[in-house]
Image (cartoon, grey):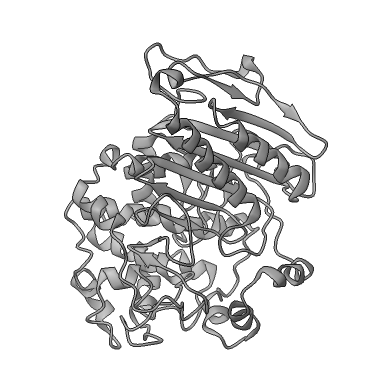
Amino acid sequence: MRTFAFHATHPTAHIEGTVAPGFEPVRAQFERNFAERGEIGAAVAAYWRGEKVVDLWGGRRNPAGDEPWDRDTMVIVFSTTKGLSAMTLAVANARGWLDYDAPVAHYWPEFAQNGKAAISVRQLLAHEAGLVLLDPPPSIEEMRDLDHLADVLARQTPAWPPGTRHGYHGLTIGMYMQELIRRVDPANRSLGRFFRDEIAAPLGIEFYIGLPLGIPDERLAVVKPLSRWRALLALRDTPPALIKKVLQPSSLLRRSLRIADADWTDRRVLEIEMPAGNGVGTARAIARAYSALAEGGGELGITPETLARVTATPVVARSNDEVLGVPSYFSLGFLRPGPDISFGSSPRAFGAPGAGGSFAFADPDLRLGYAYVMNKLDFHLTDDPRERALRDAIKASIGRLEQRPARDRAGSECSATRPSSTRRPRPSGAGLGCGDSQPDITE
């Protein structure tokens, strides 16, 4: 597939990027997000069968200004970070450093305190350990000291008997993943450094867990926080059980999200490593990472055995989430499809949503890597209408293309939303999909 460029200016937004032939409905839905669904700034990307078929961005980088969302604009993706962090553990598993079924204390002896000796890595990553809270909540400065944080984590007591139920570990899951990587990695790297070296660099993508000082502010989108007024409007779409958890100050949900001085619009918060919630990057980078796994993981050294573990149907004793009050399904650090949560073409899909509406996942059966990011935060745990419209359009486009004879798909050219003069040259015989042939960054 080859790309041709175009750009579109709408009354509400300037939109650029590329889509492959057959994926034009995705562009149409992206435009509708700005025209009808209140989008401010956003990006969506998808890789199908290893080729980039959607790469769109548009709107405003700053909700309070006119700065455009550019090709390389990055944004915090909150809990969508969890999926990228879980990839580091999959790499460690493939290398034989980490056994998902071993006790966490096998790698981290201090973890065994206060009734945690038998908790397995698998239980921890399935949000079954009951380690939802941090007492006392650490400050941002304390979270820079990973040794101190490890001591705090090791002292925690489970909120329920581990393995008997599950509940969303909103912030703590990333901290525990962080320490596991530090313990099993022979180089004792932090999770953010491990991700950079072992995933971002090989794939040539720009996603950070711990934002480098050298990234200029002009490349970062500013998020529009949730407001009480918009929260009231969202009540009609929010399950009553979740509303009850949100409104109760003593609920596990409210208590689990307390970090003493976190301001998610403060760059200093982005510069520490919070593997559960402060990753920063582009939709293109996230989709590329998931595409690598959807294609089997070989680019990252992930073995078929590890991928089989990641895609295996999770065993959930009961679907209701102890923290959220609604059904959820987690396995090995990823959100999984279930009777109440639908994404991907089969139960083998895996990914992670983020607060405000972002979402990314791999679909190994469809060979799809997908990501959507934005800077206007809305109130949907999953299936934000902006994101769902794009995801559905991609799936429908693939369905139509798969019904066409292969000869009709060969040699197709992509349509795009940017001036053709901005295209990078395509190497002959490269067999690439839409967009440029270069990685997001040069390593």
In the image, residue 349 above or below residue 217: below
| Relative image position of residue 150 (x, y in whole percent) | 35, 72
The answer to whether one can see residue 69 in this image is no
Residue at image position (58%, 61%) is 355
Q: Residue furthest top?
A: 428
Q: Position of residue 44 (x, y in %)?
A: 57, 41
Residue depicted at x 43% and y 39%: 288
Q: Quadrant of residue 118?
A: bottom left
Say whether residue 185 is left or right of residue 142.
left
Classify residue 430 as left or right of residue 118: right
Residue 136 in the figure: left or right of residue 227: left
* 68, 80: nearer the viewer: 80
Q: Quadrant of the C terminus?
A: top left
x then y, percent, for residue 308: 24, 53
Please provide percent x and percent y for residue 205: 44, 37
Question: Is residue 343 something one can see in this rendering?
Answer: yes
